[in-house]
Image (cartoon, rainbow, N blue to C red):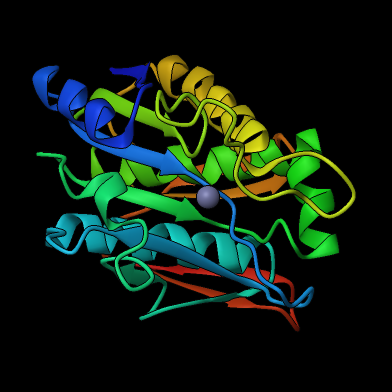
């Protein structure tokens, strides 16, 4: 259903290659960084020429990351169209397919850095990315992955921001994408219809499909998830 291909080279080259392969979606993975150790939000950069699909996909991903890691979304409801005064725009705006540049957590935030370094955190981020791809590209296809900073012919030593406590942005972004690639290529069924899951770590304790129109209400006082309709 899904094939994943990693693209390397300078950013423009990667995008051209993905265009030639007729990829269906393009993801470049980064981590954010700030001079403030407490900066904490999930953000997606889209190209200045982004389609509604790219914007909606980016917002969905940023919201899912913020909810899961109990932080907030940055930018305009989770996205920054055209990057930081143009920075990041050229990484994705040359694609002919929907494209997003991920900045889910901060390398400069000690709590985030611990999550980024952990297999648990990498797997959680990969799963959110995979679910976002399943949601926005339900018919499968070729998914292009790009590791931010790494493998640029013009700057082979670039690894992006240093994580507080050790490690580099690009190496961990690559780990997340590798996990996501394995997950995506293991998807053996058609698009998920609407489903409800109860999960504990990697264990799915309960899963059921619900009607697309059903109203689902979580009552934390009663510990009750009520499916209406
Ligand atoms: Zn970066």
* In this picture, residue 144 sits left or right of residue 165: left
Which residue is at the far right? 165
Relative height, residue 208 to residue 13 (above, below): below
- The answer to whether residue 162 of the structure is visible from this angle is yes
* In this picture, residue 55 sits left or right of residue 227: left
State which quarter of the image contains the N terminus. Answer: top left
Q: Nearer the viewer, residue 222 or 111?
A: 111
In percent of width and height, residue 195 lies at 43, 48
Relative height, residue 78 to residue 146 (above, below): below
State which quarter of the image contains the C terminus. Answer: bottom left
- Give the residue drawn at x 42%, y 78%: 75
Which residue is at the far front? 154
- The answer to whether residue 193 of the structure is visible from this angle is no
- Give the residue drawn at x 35%, y 56%: 88
- Give the residue drawn at x 86%, y 43%: 166
In percent of width and height, residue 152 lies at 43, 28
Quarter where residue 169 is shown: top right
* In this picture, residue 35 sits left or right of residue 211: right
Q: Nearer the viewer, residue 78 or 155?
A: 155
- Counting the numbered discs, the total is 0
In percent of width and height, residue 155 lies at 48, 31
Relative height, residue 166 to residue 79 (above, below): above
Quarter where residue 87 is shown: bottom left
In percent of width and height, residue 148 lies at 48, 39
Relative height, residue 201 to residue 140 (above, below): below
């Amino acid at each position: 259903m899904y094939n994943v291909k990693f693209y390397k080279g300078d950013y423009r080259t990667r995008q051209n290659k993905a265009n030639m392969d007729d990829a269906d979606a393009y993801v470049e993975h980064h981590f954010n960084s700030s001079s403030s150790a407490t900066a904490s939000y999930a953000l997606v950069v889209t190209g200045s020429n982004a389609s509604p699909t790219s914007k909606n996909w980016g917002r969905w991903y940023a919201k899912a990351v913020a909810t899961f890691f109990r932080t907030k979304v940055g930018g305009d409801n989770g996205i920054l169209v055209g990057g930081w005064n143009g920075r990041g725009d050229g990484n994705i705006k040359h694609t002919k397919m929907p494209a997003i540049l991920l900045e889910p957590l901060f390398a400069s935030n000690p709590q985030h850095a611990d999550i980024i370094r952990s297999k648990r955190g990498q797997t959680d981020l990969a799963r959110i990315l995979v679910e976002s791809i399943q949601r926005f590209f339900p018919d499968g296809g070729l998914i292009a992955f790009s590791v931010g900073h790494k493998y640029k012919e013009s700057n082979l030593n670039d690894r992006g921001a240093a994580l507080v406590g050790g490690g580099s942005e690009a190496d961990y972004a690559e780990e997340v994408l590798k996990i996501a690639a394995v997950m995506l290529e293991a998807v053996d069924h058609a698009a998920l219809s609407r489903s409800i899951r109860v999960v504990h770590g990697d264990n799915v304790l309960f899963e059921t499909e619900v009607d697309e129109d059903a109203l689902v209400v979580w009552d934390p006082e009663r510990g009750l998830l009520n499916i209406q309709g």
